[in-house]
Image (spheres, rainbow, N blue to C red):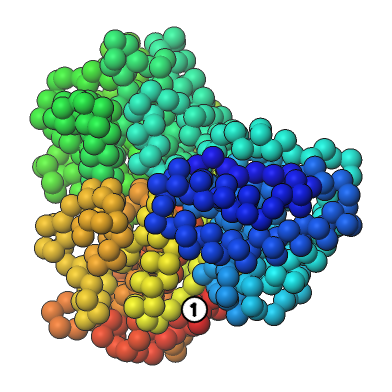
Amino acid sequence: MAVVRYTLEGLLDVSQDEVLGRLAIAYAEMGFAALWASAIDAWKTQLPALQEAVRQLIGDRPEARGWHVLFEYSIPLRDRRPDAVILGTNVIFVIEFKVGAESYDSVAAWQVQSYALDLRDFHPGCCDKTIVPILVATHAPGTAFSERLIGTQLRAASFPVQETNCVTLGSCLRHFAATECKATVAAIDATKWEAARYLPTPTIIEAAQTLFGGHQVQDLSHAFSDTLDLTSAAIVSAIGQSQRDSCRTICFVTGIPGSGKTLVGLNAVHSPSLSKESQSSAVFLSGNGPLVKVIRESLSREQAKKGVRKSEARDVASSFIANVHGFLKTFGIDKTGEAPNQHAIIFDEAQRAWTAKAVEKAHGINCSEPAMVLDIMERVSGWATVIALVGGGQEINTGEAGLPEWGRALADRPGRWRVLVSSEVLSGGESVAGQKLFPDGVPSSVHVVDVPKLHLRVNVRSHRAKFIGAWVNQMLSDVPSGTPGPTPDGEFPVVLTRDLTQARRWLRQREEKQQRTGLLASSGAIRLRAHGLELSSGFRKGLSYADWFLNDVADVRSSYKLEIAATEFDCQGLEIDWAGVCWGGDFVIDPQTGKWECWQFSGTTWKRVKDATKRRYIANKYRVLLTRARRGMIIWVPEGCEAAKNADWLAATADRLTAGGVQVLA
C-alpha cells in the first residue's frame, strides 16, 4: 500500500474529502475494496479529531508544522496497520482509534502497544526514539497520562498505552511533545523512515530457511545481530583454527533459554568457509526428533516452492541437519571402522547425550554418547571440531548424561583435544542449571581455554522477556511464595485463567499473520483428557508436528486450531509466538507445605514420585513449556480435581503463580 502521508501543516490545509479520497484509493490498491467503505466511515469521525489535535499541537510547538503523519502505515510482515503514525523529532506517536467505544478495551490496548513495541524493536528508523502508543476510544472518558517508560532495552523506549478520547487526544500530543521532544534534534526524515528495512527476529524455522537459502546470521535481525555475530564468528574461527593446525577441538557454547544456541549452530553449518562444491564440512546434529523433522520439512517445502523436487530437497536438507542418535548408531555401533565425511559436527543440546548405561540398554555397548562422539571424530583424518551447544534444566528423558559426562570423556583422553569453553561450564552458571564440565576441577592433562564469546546472554526467542528464564527458574524452585525476584512485565504478558475456553479466546484474540498460537502441555498431564486434551503417547504418535508447527490457520492440523496440545517432547527447541500452557496434575503445589510435588498417573490413580532424578525431569518439563513463547503466554490451571489429585493442589498452584507476578485474567 502506498502510504498516505502529510506534513502536520499540510494536514490542516487539506480538505477532509481529499484525505478520505486518497485513503479510499489506497485501500483499493491493497485489494481491500470490500473493507474500504467501513474504514472510510470510521475516518469521517477520526480525521476531524486528529486535525483538531494537530492544530493544538502546532499552537504549542510551531516547529511541529514540518512533522509528518502517516495514515494506515502497514507494519511489514504483520499485515496490521495503526491508524496513524506521527513522526516528530525524537518522539513517534502511534495512534489507534476505536470509533464508538465507551471504554478502553484490553485487547485494543494490547493491539496498539504491540504496534509500538514492534516498531521500537525492529524498525531501524525508531533507533534512539521514544514511542508513545495512544488508544483513542471516541466515547470514553479521558484518563491521566502515564509517565512510566517500558524499559530502554535495545535502541529505544516506549511508554505504556495512553488512553484518550477525541477531546483529550490533543492534550496527549502536547504533553508528550513538551516532555519528550528535544529542540536540538531535527525532525525525522519521513521518506527514509518509510523506506527503512524492517527486520523482526525470526523463529528458528524462519532462521533455518534463511540460512539454508545462502544468507548469514547478520541478515536475520538487526536487533540481535551483534550478540549472535560474535558467537557465530567464535565458532567458525575455532573450526578454522582446527583446520589450519590439523588438530582436534571441542567448543562448549552456552546460553540462557532462547538465546540462539541452535541458531548459531545452524549458522556455522552454513558458513561459506566450510562449504566446498555445495557440500559442507559440517553437519548439525540434534537428539530432538521433532525439531529435526520440523526443520527438514520446512526447508523442503521452501525448496519445493522454487521448483526443486521435494524428495531432492529432503535429501539436501538431511545433509545439513540430522538426528544425532542415527549418526552415532551408524559410526559408533554399525560401522566402527569408518569415519564420517564431515570434519565438524554441531551437537545441539549436548548435555542430553546418553549415559553409558542408556547406550548399553539400547545397543549392548558400554560407552556413553560423549565418549562415542570423541571416538568417532578422532577417526576423521587431519582435523576435527565438535561444537557442543549446552543448555541447562532441559533434561527430560531418562538416561540423559548431563554436562559432567563430557568432562569424564575428555579426562580419559589426555592431550588429545583442545577444549574451548564458556566460563559457565566451568563455574556451573545459571545457563547450565549449576552443572559443571569438571565437577572436581579441571584435570591437569586437559588443555582448557576460556572464550567469553562462547556464551549467549541475550534472549532472542522472547526479545521482550529479558528475565523470563530467571522467573521460570524461581517459579519452579521451592523458595517461599512471595520471595522477591524477577517478575513478568507488560512487554511480555503472562496471564492466568482457570477456564480453558477463556484461554483459547485470549489466544485467538492475538492470532495474526506471522504470529503462531498453540497449546502446550506436559506429557504427564494425562488427566487433562477430562477437559478434552489427549496426551497419551499412542495418540501423539499418530500426529505430524511438522503440520502443527508449519501449517496455516485454515488447516485443522495446525497449532492455530487450539485442539491439540504439543508436549515438551514435541516443542523442545522450537517456539511459538503466543503459548497456552495447560497445567496438569503431575507438577503441583502441596497446599500444606507450599512446595512442589511430582506425580505420575498410573492405572486409575495418581502416585507420588519420590525418585530425585524423575522429579527433576518432571520439573524440567514445565521449564521447557514455560520458555517456548516469543511474545507472551496464558497459563491455564484447571478447576476441579479431574486434572490432579484434588482441587486444593490446583488452587495452590494457581496461587503460587499469581504470587510470582502472573496476572489473573478478568
Residue tagged 1: 665
Give coordinates of residue 347: x percent, y percent.
Answer: 34, 35
Q: Nearer the viewer, residue 587 or 32?
A: 32
Give coordinates of residue 338: x percent, y percent.
Answer: 16, 19
- Against 172, residue 30 (above or below) is above
Residue at image point 76% right, 74% down: 144
Give coordinates of residue 335: x percent, y percent.
Answer: 12, 25
Using residue 607 as the reference point, say whether residue 659 is left or right of it.
Answer: right
Badge 1: residue crowd in 10 Å (few <14, some 14–19, many ≥20): some
Residue at image point 11% right, 63% down: 538
Q: Which image quadrant for residue 84?
A: bottom right
- Against 27, residue 105 (above or below) is below
Disc 1 secondary structure class: loop
- Against 650, residue 188 (above or below) is above
Can residue 432 be seen in this snapshot?
A: no
Q: Which image quadrant for residue 529?
A: bottom left
Residue at image point 31% right, 54% down: 571
Using residue 631 as the reference point, say whether residue 89 is left or right of it.
Answer: right
Q: Which image quadrant for residue 376?
A: top left
Using residue 155 as the reference point, say whether residue 518 is left or right of it.
Answer: left
What amino acid is at disc 1? Leu
Residue at image point 32% right, 23% down: 282
Give coordinates of residue 241: x percent, y percent.
Answer: 47, 15
